[in-house]
Image: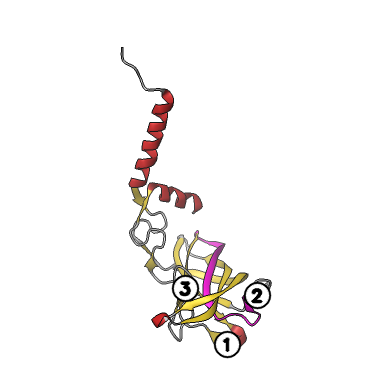
Amino acid sequence: MKTLPPLTFTLFSVAALFVGILPTFELPCPIDQGTGMLAAAQGLKVESVELKFISEKGGYAFGDCADHEKQSKFTYEVSMLLTNESGEPSEGTVIVAFNRPSSNQRLGGQVDIEGNRETELDSPPWKSAFVAVPAETTKTVKRTVSFFDRPSEDGGGAASQLQEGPHQASLEMGRDMECPTSHGTGQLSFTRWLQVMILK
C-alpha cells in the first residue's frame, strides 16, 4: 500500500517551492514599460509648485579628495499641480530645481537619486520626478525630495521646527533618465513587480 506524505508537509513544500521560484521570474517594469528608460513628460502645463518643509538634519557632505564640509540634509514634500490639455495621457519625468531666494542663491550642482549633491557650478540641484497625468485633466502630484545644502541660519535642529524651509522650487522640462525602479534593465522580479503595481 502506497503512503502519502502528510497534508501539512505537502502544503508547506508547495508554498516554499512557490516562494522560492517566484523571484526568478522577471516581468517588464510597469513604470518604464520594459525600456529601462523614463522619457521626459510632454505637453504638461505647470499650474503651481509648492514645498512643504519636512526636516533639516545636520551632517557632512564629502567632495573631491575626501574633502568635507558641514552641510544639512533638507527634506521637502513637493506638490505639483499639472494640467494635461491634450487628448492623450502624459507620463514621464519633470525636473524639480531648488534655489535659496533669501540670498538670491541658485544652488550649485545636481541631486542624484539618493539625494546627494554633485558639484556643478551655475546649475541648481535638481531631482527627477516621475509624473502621470490623464488626458484633459488637472492633477496634483506629490513627491518627497531630499538634498544637501549649507545649514540654515537657525541650524539643523531649529530648522526642523519651522513651517517653511529656506528654499523655493521651480519645475523645468524633464530629461530622459535611467529608470530608478528597474535600474535601467527594464525588468523586475515577480515580487518587486507586484510591489510596484500595488504602490503605483
Occupied quadrant, residue 175:
bottom left
Nearer mark to the viewer, of 1 and 3: 3
Q: Which residue is mark 1?
A: 104
Sequence order check, earlier mark of 2 and 1: 1
Q: Which residue is mark 3?
A: 116
Sequence order check, earlier mark of 1 and 3: 1
Report the span colored magenta: 134-156
What colouring does the structure picture have? secondary structure
Amino acid on which disc 3 is placed? Asn
Q: For the residues marked 2 and 3, what is the alpha-carbon distance in whole angstroms?
A: 20 Å
Q: Is residue 182 above or below residue 155?
A: above
Neighbour class for label 1 at 10 Å: few (<14), some, many (≥20)?
Answer: few
Amino acid on which disc 2 is placed? Ala
Which numbered dot is residue 198? Answer: none
Occupied quadrant, residue 168:
bottom right
Secondary structure of residue under mark 1: loop
Q: CB under 8 Å between callouts 2 and 1?
A: no
Q: Nearer the viewer, residue 109 or 173?
A: 109
Sequence order check, earlier mark of 2 and 3: 3
- The N terminus lies in which quarter of the figure? top left
Q: Nearer the viewer, residue 121 or 197?
A: 121
Q: Position of residue 55 (x, y in %)?
A: 61, 70
| Residue drawn at (42%, 57%) of the image | 31
Which numbered dot is residue 159? Answer: 2
Q: Position of residue 44 (x, y in %)?
A: 49, 68
Q: Is residue 148 magenta?
A: yes
Amino acid on which disc 1 is placed? Asn
Nearer mark to the viewer, of 2 and 1: 2
Q: Is residue 43 magenta?
A: no
Please give left or right for residue 13 compared with residue 86 in the image: left
Determine if residue 11 is in view: yes
Q: Position of residue 4 (x, y in %)?
A: 35, 19
